[in-house]
């Protein structure tokens, strides 16, 4: 329904007339309904929009509940706030009745007083009576009441500036003292650094920072950012090109073997030589390590490192701006370092001694033997090896105790089945070594030796066996692997009994072993003996389950 109905329940007749009126308004035959301002209401507006909720329903057709209400925004001002610390006129001379017993002001009570509690209040002394505060009634709106910065004085932020300026001045003073302690005697450089720090510490007294300061900060952060495609160190101003030229061959395309040198795609570096068979001097690319550690590159790196360390200590050394000065300072630094090292070594040796302990064997002798396995090719290149040797054992090895020359477990006694020492044949652990005498004593005291000695004294020596011929040895070998060894030999079997035994064995297997109980029963009741024919029939009809070809059936035949 387009129009809002009156409050209350409509009868059936009134509801029908309302429906007809809404239909006529939609058809244009009846005038549209008017709101409280005299504006027509569109009859095609749905009922859930045109009908006002129960807490805003006025009983007349209206669309005011769909419009933004008009509020008074005069109170939503940032400068409409309490006047902090405002006093209402001069202070009173005497204590007034009803005033604060602590300070004497009439605007608050003793429990609400913000002044430090006095030993004797103004009520009893009539001295130092505080003036009355100004009671203000600030009518703040919705936004002003919830604004966290409403009533804030920007001039108070000046204290933060002053505090940071004081900290920066103290830091600059410490920096000047540190520079004075260094070896630098250039007063002009010290004054220049101090002046630069002083200019930075001095700031304007404006309440807000200027746009120039913001631009300086932006430039500072922009310089600290890394450029795209480059490895830029903003402190040292060294730019390294990390992108290859388009005409150059990529490092990972020089050798397509997966087991060749490793290529790191993140840093675009290949440290090893991708072509092992080509000498590094002849290869077009021999790896980053070859370029980094060949020629004068290590010396340049040491010189650059010296310049950085000197610049951090306050010395004005720049390897790119003044390369000659930097190289001369580096040579002087190395010379002084060696002299200081020698003087320190001499002073320590003269004071504490021990020069004889510094003399050691040559490096070639100390590192001549190693446990590392290295395999070389015919051209002298390493094929396998240079791997870290594995530890043999976590226990101590080759430790000889009690005058032994062999470790425990180096000898095994076959007669008694015990372990012992190979140097003395002692089977007692942690025993003292007796050497060759112990070996002889162990042999003489053994049971085998005693039996041999007793038998040799009572019995004559055994006869010496006569040598056998080749035919006799061949005959013994045939007997060893023939059926006679198992008691079978060349048996004379009765063919009729064998055929009868085979048929009975097949009948028994056809009955799936039902006859086993009767046969075993007969065997138990009477002295039943299995004949050779029945045993041969059983062997002929036996099924070898372990035979892998037992279930094989050839389907192609």
Image: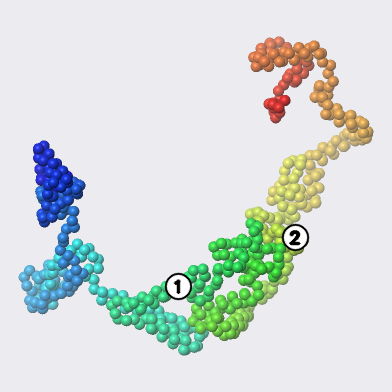
Q: Which residue is mark 1?
A: 224
Residue found at x 63% / y 67%: 287
Name the spot of residue 22 as percent of width and height, x first: 14, 44
Q: Which residue is mark 2?
A: 377
**Figure quadrant of residue 324:** bottom right
Relative side of 167 to 306, left or right: left
Residue found at x 63% / y 71%: 291
- Foreground pick, 239 / 353: 239
In the rendered image, the vertical position of residue 182 relative to residue 499, given as above or below: below
Circle 1: is it few (<14), some (14-19), or many (20+) Cα within 10 Å? Answer: few
Pick whichever of labels 1 and 2 is earlier in the sequence. Answer: 1
Circle 2: is it few (<14), some (14-19), or many (20+) Cα within 10 Å? Answer: few
- Foreground pick, 16 / 131: 16
In the rendered image, the vertical position of residue 501 relative to residue 63, given as above or below: above
Q: Which mark is residue 45?
A: none
| Secondary structure category for the residue under label 2 | loop
Residue found at x 13% / y 71%: 102
Name the spot of residue 288 as percent of width and height, x first: 62, 68
**Figure quadrant of residue 473:** top right
Residue 388 visible somewhere in the drawing: no
In the rendered image, the vertical position of residue 200 relative to residue 462, given as above or below: below
- Foreground pick, 39 / 54: 39
Relative side of 320 to 545, left or right: left
Residue 263 visible somewhere in the drawing: yes
């Amino acid at each position: 329904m387009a129009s809002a109905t009156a409050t209350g329940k409509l009868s059936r007749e009134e509801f029908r007339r309302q429906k007809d009126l809404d239909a006529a308004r939609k058809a244009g035959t009846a005038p549209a309904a008017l709101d409280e301002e005299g504006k027509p209401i569109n009859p095609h507006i749905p009922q859930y929009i045109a009908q006002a909720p129960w807490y805003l329903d006025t009983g007349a057709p209206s669309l005011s509940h769909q419009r933004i209400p008009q509020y008074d925004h005069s109170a939503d001002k940032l400068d409409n706030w309490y006047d902090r610390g405002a006093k209402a006129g001069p202070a009173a001379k005497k204590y007034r009745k009803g005033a604060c017993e602590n300070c004497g002001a009439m605007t608050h009570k003793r429990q609400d007083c913000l002044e430090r509690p006095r030993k004797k209040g103004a009520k009893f002394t009539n001295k130092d009576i505080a003036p009355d505060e100004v009671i203000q009634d600030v009518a703040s709106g919705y936004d002003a009441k919830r604004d966290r910065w409403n009533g804030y004085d920007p001039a108070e932020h000046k204290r933060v500036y002053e505090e940071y300026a004081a900290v920066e001045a103290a830091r600059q003073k410490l920096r000047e003292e540190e520079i004075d302690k260094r070896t630098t005697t250039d007063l002009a450089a010290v004054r220049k650094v101090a002046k630069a720090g002083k200019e930075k510490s001095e700031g304007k007294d404006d309440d807000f920072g200027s746009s120039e300061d913001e631009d300086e900060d932006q430039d500072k952060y922009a310089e600290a950012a890394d450029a795209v495609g480059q490895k830029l160190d903003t402190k040292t101003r060294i730019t390294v090109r990390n992108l290859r030229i388009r005409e150059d061959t990529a490092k990972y395309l020089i050798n397509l073997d997966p087991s060749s040198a490793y290529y790191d795609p993140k840093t675009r570096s290949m440290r090893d030589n991708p072509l092992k068979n080509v000498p590094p001097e002849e290869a077009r690319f021999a790896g980053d390590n070859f370029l980094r550690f060949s020629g004068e590159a290590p010396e340049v790196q040491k010189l650059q490192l010296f310049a950085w360390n000197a610049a951090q200590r306050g010395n004005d050394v720049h390897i790119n701006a003044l390369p000659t000065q930097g190289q001369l300072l580096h040579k002087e630094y190395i010379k002084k370092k060696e002299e200081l090292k020698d003087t320190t070594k001499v002073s320590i040796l003269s004071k504490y001694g021990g020069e004889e302990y510094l003399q050691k064997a040559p490096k070639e002798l100390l590192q001549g033997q190693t446990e590392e396995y290295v395999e070389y090719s015919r051209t002298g290149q390493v094929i396998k090896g240079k791997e870290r040797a594995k530890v043999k054992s976590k226990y101590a090895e080759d430790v000889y105790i009690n005058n032994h020359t062999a470790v425990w477990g180096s000898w095994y006694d076959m007669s008694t089945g015990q372990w012992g020492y190979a140097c003395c044949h002692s089977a007692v652990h942690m025993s003292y070594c007796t050497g060759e005498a112990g070996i002889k004593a162990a042999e003489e005291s053994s049971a085998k030796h005693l039996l041999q000695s007793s038998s040799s004294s009572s019995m004559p020596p055994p006869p010496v066996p006569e040598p056998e011929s080749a035919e006799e040895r061949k005959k013994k070998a045939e007997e060893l692997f023939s059926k006679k060894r198992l008691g079978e030999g060349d048996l004379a079997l009765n063919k009729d009994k064998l055929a009868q035994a085979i048929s009975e064995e097949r009948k028994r297997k056809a009955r799936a072993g039902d006859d086993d109980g009767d046969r075993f029963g007969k065997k138990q009741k009477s002295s039943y003996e299995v004949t050779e024919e029945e045993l041969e029939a059983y062997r002929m009809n036996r099924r070898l389950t372990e035979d892998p070809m037992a279930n094989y059936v050839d389907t192609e035949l």
